[in-house]
Image: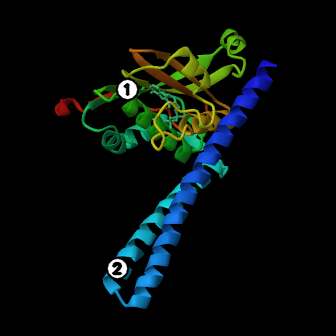
């Protein structure tokens, strides 16, 4: 019964979201039609300056509508996974510039890469987009600034852990931890955060899709994702991806502290 209720709530959320998108799309379409209609009339009158103005309005509205469907498509399209042996250390340090630009100047970035890190088997592009999404969430959780830490380590999830977290297969994983010193999440938010369309952000700012996509990526990669969070203290997001047992050297780790000069 609990599961049915949850399912019903989810369907309600999906309904609300699709309804909201249909509504937004319809508004934009109304704008396009209205502008084209005005254009036609002004054209008949020969007022070319007004024709130009209405053309611009129509193009702007049409572009917004295109962006809206694009976002929706990007979510619904099941992106095929292309798993490869990946060095998480190299991947994370390679994102340094992008991450710094994403989080802005108020947030300090700290990257801690473990020495002797195993390689993992996953789709590197999806891992990058997961980390970027987590960084955006972290930035949103720290409007007054703070520290974003991205840390890698080898993790052995044993039978006892796997018994507690039923979804986990015991074994060796590469863990990527993303920690912020932001507002944190309530227990209720944590329990719903992975659900598609769950968001606490204002309309137009949050889609509620970021974490559900990351969760999907983790599960499809035969890994695991978990949130630890405390209101007022911050959030740690742990992404476990399976160890790759092949050739390929283990990584030299090092610690970089970035953004100090920005303080
Ligand atoms: P969105 O960011 O579009 O809302 P997500 O699926 O990425 O969608 O996140 C869902 C919700 O989880 C957010 O609206 C927010 O309430 C909460 N959340 C996610 N990341 C964090 C974080 N780092 N700190 C606090 N709350 C978070």
Q: Which residue is mark 1?
A: 149
From the viewer's perspective, tell me whether residue 223 is left or right of residue 176. Answer: right
44 over 107 or under it: above or below: below
Q: Residues within 10 Å of mark 1 (few under 14, many from 20)?
A: some
Residue displayed at 29% across by 38% down: 104
Residue displayed at 73% across by 25% down: 6
* CA separation in Å, label 1 and label 2: 53 Å
239 or 9: nearer the viewer:
9
Callout 1 secondary element? strand
236 or 204: nearer the viewer:
204
Q: Which residue is mark 2?
A: 50
Q: Can you give x and y, in whole percent of width and height, for residue 85 in the image?
A: 58, 41
> In the rendered image, is residue 155 in sight?
no
Q: Can you give x and y, in whole percent of width and height, for residue 165 in the image?
A: 68, 16
Which of pointers 1 and 2 indicates the residue nearer the eye?
A: 2
Q: Mark 2 near ligand 1 (CB under 8 Å)?
A: no
106 over 155 or under it: above or below: below
232 over 79 or under it: above or below: above
Q: Can you give x and y, in whole percent of width and height, for residue 166 in the image?
A: 72, 17
226 or 32: nearer the viewer:
32
Residue displayed at 61% across by 54% down: 73
Q: Can you give x and y, in whole percent of width and height, for residue 81 in the image?
A: 65, 47
Residue displayed at 58% across by 33% down: 198
Q: Quadrant of residue 167?
A: top right
Count the marks: how many? 2
Q: Earlier in the sequence, mark 1 or mark 2?
A: 2
151 or 43: nearer the viewer:
43
């Amino acid at each position: 019964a609990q599961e049915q209720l949850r399912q019903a709530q989810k369907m309600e959320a999906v309904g609300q979201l699709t309804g909201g998108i249909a509504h937004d799309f319809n508004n934009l379409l109304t704008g396009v039609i209205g502008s084209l209609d005005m254009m036609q009339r002004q054209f008949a009158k020969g007022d070319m300056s007004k024709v130009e103005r209405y053309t611009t309005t129509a193009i702007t509205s049409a572009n917004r509508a295109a962006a809206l469907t694009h976002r929706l498509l990007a979510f619904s399209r099941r992106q095929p996974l292309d798993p490869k042996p990946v060095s998480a250390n190299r991947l994370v340090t390679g994102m340094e510039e992008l991450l710094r630009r994403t989080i802005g100047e108020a947030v300090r970035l700290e990257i801690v890469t473990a020495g002797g890190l195993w390689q993992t088997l996953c789709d590197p592009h999806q891992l990058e987009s997961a980390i970027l999404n987590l960084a955006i969430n972290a930035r949103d959780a720290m409007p007054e600034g703070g520290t974003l830490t991205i840390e890698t380590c080898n993790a052995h999830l044993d039978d006892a852990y796997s018994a507690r977290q039923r979804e986990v297969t015991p074994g060796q994983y590469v863990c990527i931890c993303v920690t912020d010193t932001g507002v944190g999440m309530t227990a209720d938010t944590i329990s719903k955060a992975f659900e598609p369309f769950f968001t606490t952000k204002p309309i137009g700012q949050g889609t509620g899709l970021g974490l559900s996509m990351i969760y999907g990526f983790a599960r499809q990669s035969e890994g695991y994702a978990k949130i630890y969070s405390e209101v007022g203290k911050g959030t740690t997001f742990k992404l476990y991806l399976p160890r790759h047992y092949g050739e390929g050297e283990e990584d030299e780790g090092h610690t970089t502290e970035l953004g100090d000069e920005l303080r």
